[in-house]
Image: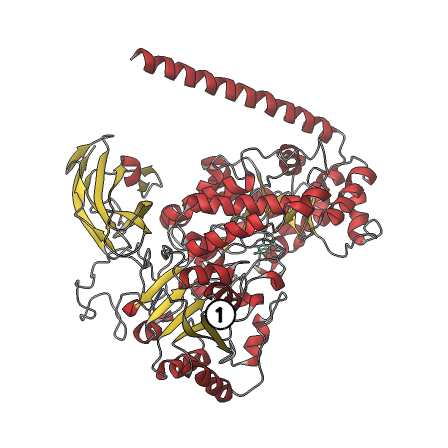
Amino acid sequence: MKIFAITVSLFLLVQINHSSAQKASDSKMNQFISNLMSRMTIDEKIGQLNLSGAGDITTGQTTSSGIGKKIKEGKVGGLLNIKTVSKIRAVQKIAVEEARLKIPLLFGMDVIHGYQTIFPIPLGLSCTWDMSLIEQSARIAAQEASADGLCWTFAPMVDISRDPRWGRMSEGSGEDPYLGACVAKAMVKGFQGEDLRKNNSILACVKHFALYGATESGREYNTTDMSRIRMYNEYFPPYKAAVEAGAGSVMSSFNEVDGLPATANKWLMNEVLRKQWGFTGFVVTDYTAISELTEHGLGDLQEVSTQALQAGIDFDMVSEGFLTTLKKSLETGRVTRAQIDLGCRRILEAKYKLGLFDDPYRYCDDNRAKTEIFTPGNLKVSRHIAGQSLVLLKNDNQILPLRKEGTIAVIGPLSDNKFNMTGTWSVAADFSKCISLLSGIKAAAGNDTRILTAWGTNILNDSILDSRVSVFGKPTFRQSRPQNEMIAEAVEVAKKADVIVAAVGECAEMSGECSSRSDINLPDNQKELLKALLATGKPVVMVLFNGRPLALSWENANVPAILEVWFPGSEAGNAIADILFGEVNPAGKLTSTFPQNAGQIPIYYNSKNTGRPLISGTWFTKFRSNYLDVSNEPVYPFGYGLSYTKFTYGDLKLSSSITKGNHPIAASISLTNSGKVDGAEVVQLYIRDVVGSVTRPLKELKGFQKIFLKVGETKQVTFTITPDDLKFYNRDLKYDWEPGDFVIMIGGNSRDLKSAKVTWMK
Ligand code: BGC
C-alpha cells in the first residue's frame, strides 16, 4: 500500500513537473508570437495564411520568380511540393533575409508511404497489422524527407472507405475504424517522432477531414452524406486518434459533410475537431478547396474565403482566396481582425514548434541529404515491411513456396515493370531504381533455376484508358503488337516451364487520386492471358498488383495460387521473391473486403443485421435481405489471409460469463502452429453488442495480436476486455456502453471465428 502511495505521488509529481514545464514553454511561445504579431501589418498576417504552390521556382532565379517576389513581400506562409536542400535553402533565404519580418516558411509535401525509399502503399501497409513496422516506415519517411529540406507532410491519410471503386482506397488503411485508428496513431508518432524540434521530425497532417472515403458511387470528389451517428462510430475514429496522438495539422476534405463542404463547415472544424477533440494545431485546405467552394455553389471567391475563415480554416492551399480577398472582407466587416489573427497565430505556432524561428535552415543540411536518403539500411527495412504486407489469398496443393530449381516462366505486363512498383503518391521516388518482379526472382532463384519471360498482354487494351493512367512518370510500357500474338508468344514460353508466375493487375495510377473505376475486374485482356496460361496445364501463381480490392470471383475459382502484393515499393521484386520462394512466410491479412462484383459495394464486415437478415447457410430467400443474382458473401472477408503453415484455434474461454461495471474479463484461445513451417498469425478479437438503444453492428474489431509460432508450438492468446471496448456513440452522440449480452469472437479473419457470450451489468 505504502509503495503504491509513493509510486502514485512520484507519478503525480512527474506529471505536475511536466505540465508546469509545458506551461512555461507555451507561455514563452505565446509571448514570442504576440510580440511578432504586434509588429505585423494586416497584409503580412494574411500572407501567413497563404500556402503557395512552388510554381516557377528553380534554383538560381528564385528571387526574380513570381513566388520569390511574393515571399519577399510577406505574402506567403509556406510552399508545397518543392524539394531538395539547395532549392529549399534558396527560398527560405528570401523569406528570412529579404522579407521585412524574416518569418521562415513551412515546406510541405505528400510524403505518403516513404520519401525516396518507398514502402508499400498505405492499404498494403495496413495489411501488416503491425503498428511498430508502420510507425517505423513513417519514421524513415520523415528522416529522409527532413534530410531533403522538408518539415511537413500531408499524411497520414486516414479516410475509412468501403468502396473499392474509389481510387484513393489505396492511400488509406481500409474499412475498419478500430484498425484505422491504430494505424493513424502509429503514423503520426512515426512522422513527428518523440520531439518535433528535432531536425529529423516533420509535422504530420491528418487528412482528409472528413468522410472523403464515403464518396457516393465511388466517384472522385463526389458528394458524401451520412447520419451523424455513423460519422462518429464508423468514420471519425481514425481522425480523432491522430489528433490525440498529437498531429500538428489537419487537412479539410474536398467533399461536403452534412450538407456543407468540409472547407466551409464550422461544425466540423470548430465544434468537432477543436471543441470536442481538443485540436490545437492549424487546419489547411486541400488543393484549391477554397476556390472550389464557388463550384459547390456557395458564392464568389470573396464570399467563400470569408466562409472558410469563419469555419476555422487557417491555411489556404493554392486558391489565394485569403490572400486576395480577406482584407476587403475585413474592411466591410465580413470578417474580424481577431479571426485573421487566430489563423496567423496557429501557423506561427507550428513554425515555432518546429524550431524554425531558432534556425530556419535546420532542415537544410547537405551532408544529411547525401547520407540519409535511400540508404541500404532503409531499403532493407522497406523489403522486410513489404514482405509483411503481402497477402496470400489462395494456395491450392501448396504450389507455393516455389522451389529454386527447374524452369519458371515469369509472364505478364507487370513482370518487368519497375516504374509501376511503388503505386500512387511516390513523388520523390526514382522509379528506375525500383526492383521489378523479374529482377527479384532472378536474384533469388540461384544458378540451378532457369527463368523465362514474356510480356503476354498490355495492362489495358484500351489505349485511351491507358493514356489516362500513364502519368507522373509511370508509363505502362504498352506494346503495339496484336493481343493474340503476345498471348501466343507467352504460351510458347509457358509450355517450356514447370511453373508460371503471372504478374497481372493494375498499373500504379489505376488507383490513387482521380482514378475511380466503375468496373473493378481484372481487365479482360489480362483475364484472357490467364486463361491461355491455365490452358497449358502448368501450375499458375497469380501475383496481383493493385491499389484497391478487385472482384476476383473468376480468379478465385480458376487460378490455383493467388498472391496479393498491392504496390510493395522500392524493393517490390525482392520482397515478392522472398515470399514466392518461402524465405518469408506470408502473414498479411486483408483490411478491406473483396467483393464478388461491383454491385455488392458497399460491402464491409461490420454491417448491421437488418430486420430481415438472410438465414444462415442460404444465399437467397424471398423477402430476405439479399440479391437475386449473387450471394451476400464476399470473395475474401476482412481480416483474411493464408500462411504456408496451418494455425489451429482451440476453444474460446472467458474468465467469466457474467461481469459487472469496470471488472474486466479475459478472453483466451489457444493457437497452435500445426503446419510445417514457422510463421505468424494475426489473431483478431471481435465483439457484438446483442441488444442496444440503437442498432449495432454484427461484429466490430476490438483487438488483435500478431503471434509468431514455431512449428508445433502452442500459445495461449489472451485479450483483456473492459467496458471501454463496449462503448459507442448513442443517439445523443454520447460515448458510453450499455449493459446486456455481448458475443465475444476470436479467430484468424472476420468470418471464421470461435465465440462465447458474456453478460455485462452496470
Ligand atoms: C490531394 C491531397 C494532397 C494535395 C497536395 C490534393 O489533390 O487531395 O491529398 O495532399 O493535393 O498535393
Q: Is residue 464 visible?
A: yes
Q: Which residue is mark 1?
A: 506
Q: Nearer the viewer, residue 697 or 576?
A: 576
x, y percentage for residue 356? 69, 35
Relative image position of residue 404 (x, y in whole percent): 41, 67
- Give the quarter of the figure containing the N terminus: top left
Find numbered disc 1 in the image and state the secondary structure of the residue it sits on: loop
> From the Cβ of disc 1, is ligand 1 less than 8 Å away?
no
**Residue 251 relative to residue 235: left or right:** right
Question: Is the residue 153 above or below the residue 721 in the image?
Answer: below
Q: Is residue 461 above or below residue 647?
A: below
User: At which x and y percent is residue 279?
Assistant: 51, 36
Location of residue 151 (image quadrant): top right
- Please report the residue visible at 36 percent of the width from the left and 50 percent of the height from the top: 230
Quadrant where the C terminus is found in the figure? top left
Q: Is residue 128 left or right of residue 668?
A: right
